[in-house]
Amino acid sequence: MINSHLKLYSFGFLMLLIPQLGLAELAVIVNPSSDISSITAKEAKRIFLGKMKTVKGERLIAVDQNENLESRKTFYKSIIKKTESQLKSYWSTRIFSGKGVPPATVGNDDDVKVWVSVNKDAIGYVDSSKVDDSVFTVYTIK
Amino acid sequence: MNKNFLQLIIYFAILCFMMPINSYADNTKLFGFLRAGAAMSLDNHEVEAFEGVDKNGDFNSSTFGLNISHKISSNLHIAAQFFSAGYEESFNTHLDWGYASFSLTDELTLNFGKIKYPVLLYSEVVDIGNVYLWTAPPQELYNAESEGAYLYLESFLGSSVVHSRYLGNYEIVAQIFAGNGSVEVGGHGSEGGHGTLDKMVGGSISISDDFFTLKSGFNRYNSAGISTLDGNDVNVISVGANIDWNKFILTTEYVKGMVSDNSEANTSVFYATLGYRINALTPHISYSKLEAEEGRDVIIAGLKYQFLPSTTVKLDYLHVSPEAEHGASHDEEAESFGIVRGALDFVF
C-alpha cells in the first residue's frame, strides 16, 4: 500500500517536472516596427550564419547570446545544427578569408530583448517566457 | 622570439586597449589566430619542400595572424589580415591580404585589393589550423616549392566578383577574378627568389550544404622569372570535395597545371584524406601524389584533438617517398624519409 502511494506521488512529481525539462520554447524576435511577420527556420539559420542579409526585402542584423547560456545551446542545436567546435571552425573560415564576421553577442535573454526592442533591424532569440509587447515573435522553436 | 614577432604582439595589445573589441555598436572587429608548431625531419634529411621543417625540430612552423575588418556602410566594408611565420625570414610580418568589398546586391559582391587565392578548398584559410585535420594541408598542393606548371599562389593583387545564392538547400558560390600574383620559388628566405604570374584570370564555382562541399576552379597566367616555365602561358584546373557526414570526414583534391609550349613542365597533384571523429579525437590518414619533374608520394597519419572549441592539438607523421628523376639509375633514387609535426592552434 505504502509502495503504491509512493509510486503515485513519484509519478505526479515527475509530471510536474516535465514542463521544466527541455520543453522550454524559444522565440525568434524582431522589432515590432519591422514589416516582417514570420520567417522560416531555414531563413533564421541563414541569417545567423551570415549567409542572408534580408528577408522579404527587409534588412536584418542578427544579435547573439553569450556562449554557454541555455537559450543559445537550444538555438544552435535546433536551428543551426552545429556544435560550438563546428561553429568556431565555420566562422574561422569566414573571418580569416574576409567573407564575414559572426553576429555580435549582447548578453542573455533580457539583454537580447532590450536590444531588439530598440533597434529596428535587429533579430535575436529569447526564451518565450521573456516575450512581451516590446518585441515581435516571427518564429517559435518548440 | 624575434623582434618582428614581438612588434606584432605589441601592436595587437595597443589596438586592444584603444578600442572596445567586437562590440555590437562598434563597426570595427578584431580577430586572430596563433599556432605553436614544431616539425622535424627524421633520418637527418634537409627538407626544403616542407614549410617550417628542419633537422632540429625547431618551432619554425609557429605562426601568428591578426585580422581586422571595418564596416563603412551597409554595403561597403574593408578587411585586412597581417601574418607572421617562423619560416618566413624569422617572423617577418606582412600583409597577408587586404581588400575593400562592395555589395552590389545581396547576392553580388565586388572585391578590390590584395585577395587570397580563391580556387582551392583551403587556399583562403591555409594558415588557420582549426578548419582542417592536418597540422598543415598537403604541401604537394599548398606550397609553391615545386617548380612545375602548378605554383601555389597565396594571394594576388586585383579584383574579383562573387555571386552567391541558394538553390533549394544548396548554396552556390561562383566567382571570377583577375590580377597579378607573385610566388616564391626555390626556397624561402635568402635562398629563395620570386616569380610573377601576370595577366592572371580565373574563376571557381562551389556547391555546398551542411555536409558536403564540391568545388572546381581554373586560372590562367603568364609566368615570369620562373626558369622551368620560361615565360610561357600556364593553365591550371582544379576539382575538390569535402564530405563531413556523421563521424566520417573525407577530403580530396586534384589539380593539374599545363604549360602552353612545354608539356614536360606539366604538373599534377592529387590527395585524399579520410578521418573518423571519436568525440574530441579525430584520427586521419592521407595519401598525396605530386607528379612533376621532382615528384613524390606522401602518406600522412595524424591525430587531431579538439581541446576546446577554439583550440586544437595535432600530431602528424609524414612518410615521404621522392620519385627518381627522369633518367636516373636505381642507385641514384632518393631514399624515403619521415617527418614528425606537432601543432597547437588557437583562434580568438
Image (cartoon, helix red, strand yellow):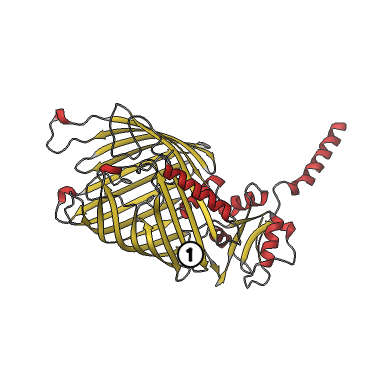
According to the picture, the residue beneath numbered tag 1 turns out to be B77
Q: From where the camera sits, is residue A1 visible?
A: no
Above/below status of A107 relative to B272? below
Locate residue B293 relative to residue B25 in the image: left or right.
Answer: left
Camera-nearest residue between A82 and B153: B153
Q: Across the whole image, how many numbered discs are drawn on residues?
A: 1
Q: Residue at x 29, y 35 (%)?
A: B47
Secondary element under disc 1, as helix, strand or loop, is: strand
Q: Residue furthest top?
A: B43
Question: What's the residue type where badge 1 is placed?
Answer: His
The quadrant of the rendering that contains the N terminus of chain B is top left
- Tag 1: Cα neighbours inside 10 Å, few (<14), some, or many (≥20)? many
Residue closer to the observer: A141 or B215 = B215
Q: Is residue A41 left or right of residue B291?
A: right
Q: Position of residue A112 (x, y in %)?
A: 67, 59
Percent coordinates x, y for residue B35 in the rendering: 45, 41
* Quadrant in the picture for residue B274: top left
Query: In the visual, does A21 lie left or right of A66?
Result: right
**Corner quadrant of residue A61:** bottom right
